[in-house]
Amino acid sequence: MSNPGAIAEILEKSLGLQQPPVAVSLLEDRPEGVPVWEGSAPAGCRFWQEAVSRTFATQARHHGLCAIGIHTHNLESTPATNTDLNDTLKVFADLGYVRVEDVPQIPVLGQRPNWVVYGPLAEASSMPDVALLFVKANQTLILSEAAQQAESGLPPAMGRPACAIVPQAVNSGRSALSLGCCGARAYLDVLTDEVGLFAIPGARLEAVAERVQALAGANAVLAKFHQLRRAAVESGGTPTVRESLEAFQRSAGA
């Protein structure tokens, strides 16, 4: 199953994703045949939404309107983006949103990529550095359970900035959950109030996907069991677990 297309299919079907998984690759050279992004983007996170339907390559200049994204992705800065970053951090500090002591805690890529390639995971020619999923709480439940089993630990839940989820996953080699940030929610139509982001490092994709497939099926079965048990209790019953299991088996065989 070590191909991105098969993994994308498992994740989409098992989780019932509304948006396909997005591949993010941090590269030295642009892959042959991958077009360069054209136009402007208000923030680097906007590329995630565009990558749902097409593959493209970006460089630092394409992220020029997003000083925070340039910082978290360790992209080459310019005097203009440095000024924007300082002005942004001052506004954040004045609002009490990001304090000076908070800045060193924001994940930043350990290495500087020359190109960042975005696109549907299903179309990736090789394993990306990170796969990004737009998820709801019930989908995050399964992903967190899968990551815990595949990575021997629970993924962290992160807040602002949302783009820091990429360096977090890359630097740690472990999955991460982002609750988004107000900026990402302003720039991405798909990041609605009930949606978050889940990042899986490429090296863990196959293992996490295998556990997602198994756990999604188990969760569906267990949900029905608990629903039957709740109904029995609310009807005045005091069923043992064995009695609830027998009732569930009878309903499954009906």
Image (tube, rainbow, N blue to C red):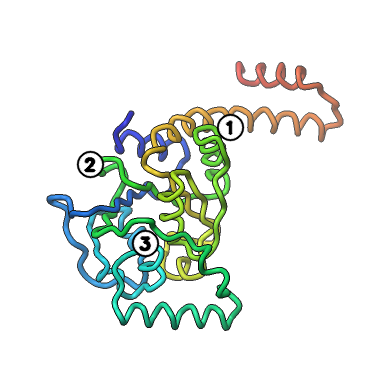
Q: Is residue 142 above or below residue 186?
A: above
Q: Which residue, given by chain and number where applicable, does mark 1 sit on?
A: 219
Query: As shown in the figure, which amino acid type bears the numbered disc 1?
Result: Asn
Q: CA distance from mark 1 to mark 2?
A: 32 Å
Query: Are discs 1 and 2 less than 8 Å apart at CB?
Result: no
Please identify the quarter of the rendering in which residue 17 is found.
top left
Mark nearer the N terminus (3 vs 2): 3
Mark toward the viewer: 3 or 2 = 3
Badge 3: residue crowd in 10 Å (few <14, some 14–19, many ≥20): many
Q: Is residue 234 above or below residue 55?
A: above
Residue 226 horizontal/vertical position (percent): 70, 31
Q: CA distance from mark 3 to mark 1?
A: 36 Å
Q: CA distance from mark 3 to mark 2?
A: 22 Å
Q: Which residue, given by chain and number where applicable, does mark 2 sit on?
A: 125
For this view, does 229 lie left or right of residue 46? right
Which residue is found at the position 25% from the left and 71% from the top? 61
Query: As shown in the figure, which amino acid type bears the numbered disc 2?
Result: Ser
Badge 2: residue crowd in 10 Å (few <14, some 14–19, many ≥20): few
Quadrant where the C terminus sits is top right
Residue 98 horizontal/vertical position (percent): 56, 73
Badge 1: residue crowd in 10 Å (few <14, some 14–19, many ≥20): some
Which residue is found at the position 29% from the left and 34% from the top? 3
| Mark number displayed over residue 73 | 3
Query: As shown in the figure, which amino acid type bears the numbered disc 3?
Result: His
Kind of element beneath mark 3: loop
